[in-house]
């Protein structure tokens, strides 16, 4: 499990919010009929903000 | 794609990581001699070069199955967020600043104690490999996304390597005066901007100003980071 955890931390920087935010942004980009660019950028912006409020290591 | 943007991103990212690697290598050189430090460093450099040389064409061929931007973009967004949030925490004093002198002193102490039976070569090898891996991943992803500009992305990393090596050899001391947090912020913003651009392009989005949208993202994320630093400062003070 530890190597998997280290790989996860390496890719995500230890953030749970970041991968979830990227996934939501992609769903938005693929499915929204209008304003896809704006919504995509806003979700990623919110993801950055949200991830900074996660537990500080 | 603006080649200077790619080269600048790999340059700054590499500069930060190589400064950290230089601290470890200098610690090994001061306790186990220059030969041990050089052997470990060259060994790790060979592994990293092999990783980039093999990884780039592998990723390009994998991209034949899907849009390369959809593989590379999310990685860069995640890396960018990881770099930027640490920099935000440090500016807001919610995380300790990276102190190269303190890390150097700690490494020297551990190496002299020798309780962990680590040889100097192994420590230098591991240090350079760990610090260089993230740079190698960034160079591979850039190389796969823009194969015609691979010279620029690899060139940025090599320029940083040359600069840090020359300065470290000249000073023979940890590069404590390098503004690491400022560099980390710049890299985080640039990686996020590139990741957002490529990720969106892979999802079929049409960016408003073409390549110039990258600079709009840089401004947007830099502004967001500045606001977040203030928010965290106030949260810490409250």
Image (cartoon, coloured by chain):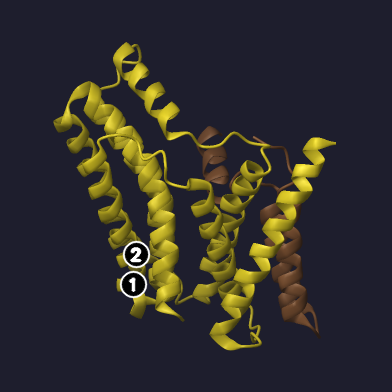
Chain colours: A brown, B yellow
Q: Do the residues labelled 1 and 2 touch (CB within 8 Å)?
A: yes
Q: Is mark 1 on a helix, strand or loop?
A: helix
Q: Decide if residue B43 is on the left or right side of residue B177.
A: left
Q: Quadrant of the C terminus of chain B?
A: top right
Q: In this view, does B61 lie above or below B14?
A: below
Rendered location of residue B213, percent (x, y): 60, 81
Residue at 57% from the left image edge and 38% from the top image edge:
A5
Q: Decide if residue A45 is on the left or right side of residue B82.
A: right
Q: In this view, does B108 lie above or below B203?
A: above
Chain of residue at mark 1: B
Question: Circle 2 sits on which residue?
Answer: B156
Closer to the camera in the image, B84 or A15: B84
- The local crowd at label 2, few if under 14, some if 14 to 19, many if 20 or more residues have their Cα within 10 Å, is many
Work out how far the residue at label 1 is from the one at label 2, CA to CA, in angstroms.
Answer: 6 Å
Chain of residue at mark 2: B
Residue at 80% from the left image edge and 36% from the top image edge:
B237
Question: Circle 1 sits on which residue?
Answer: B152
Residue at 39% from the left image edge and 63% from the top image edge:
B140
Q: In this view, does B184 lie above or below B203?
A: above
């Amino acid at each position: 499990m530890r190597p998997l955890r280290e790989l996860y931390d390496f890719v995500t920087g230890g953030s749970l919010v970041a991968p979830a935010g990227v996934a939501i942004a992609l769903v938005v980009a693929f499915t929204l009929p209008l304003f896809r660019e704006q919504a995509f950028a806003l979700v990623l912006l919110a993801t950055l903000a949200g991830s900074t409020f996660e537990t500080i290591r | 794609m603006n080649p200077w943007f790619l080269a600048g991103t790999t340059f700054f990212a590499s500069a930060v990581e190589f400064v950290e690697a230089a601290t470890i290598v200098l610690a090994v050189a001061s306790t186990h001699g220059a030969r041990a430090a050089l052997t470990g460093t060259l060994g790790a450099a060979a592994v990293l070069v092999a990783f980039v040389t093999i990884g780039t064409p592998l990723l390009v061929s994998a991209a034949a199955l899907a849009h390369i931007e959809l593989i590379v973009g999310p990685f860069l967004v995640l890396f960018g967020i990881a770099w930027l949030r640490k920099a935000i925490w440090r500016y807001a004093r919610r995380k300790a600043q990276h102190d190269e002198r303190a890390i150097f002193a700690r490494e020297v102490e551990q190496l002299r104690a020798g309780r962990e039976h680590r040889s100097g070569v192994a420590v230098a090898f591991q240090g350079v490999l760990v610090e260089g891996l993230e740079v190698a991943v960034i160079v591979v992803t850039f190389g796969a996304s823009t194969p015609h500009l691979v010279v620029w992305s690899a060139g940025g990393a090599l320029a940083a390597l040359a600069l840090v090596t020359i300065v470290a050899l000249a000073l023979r001391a940890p590069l404590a005066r390098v503004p690491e947090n400022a560099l980390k912020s710049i890299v985080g913003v640039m990686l996020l901007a590139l990741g957002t651009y490529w990720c969106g392009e892979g999802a079929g989005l049409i960016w408003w100003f073409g390549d110039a949208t990258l600079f709009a993202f840089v401004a947007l994320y830099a502004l967001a980071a500045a606001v977040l630093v203030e928010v965290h400062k106030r949260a810490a003070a409250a």
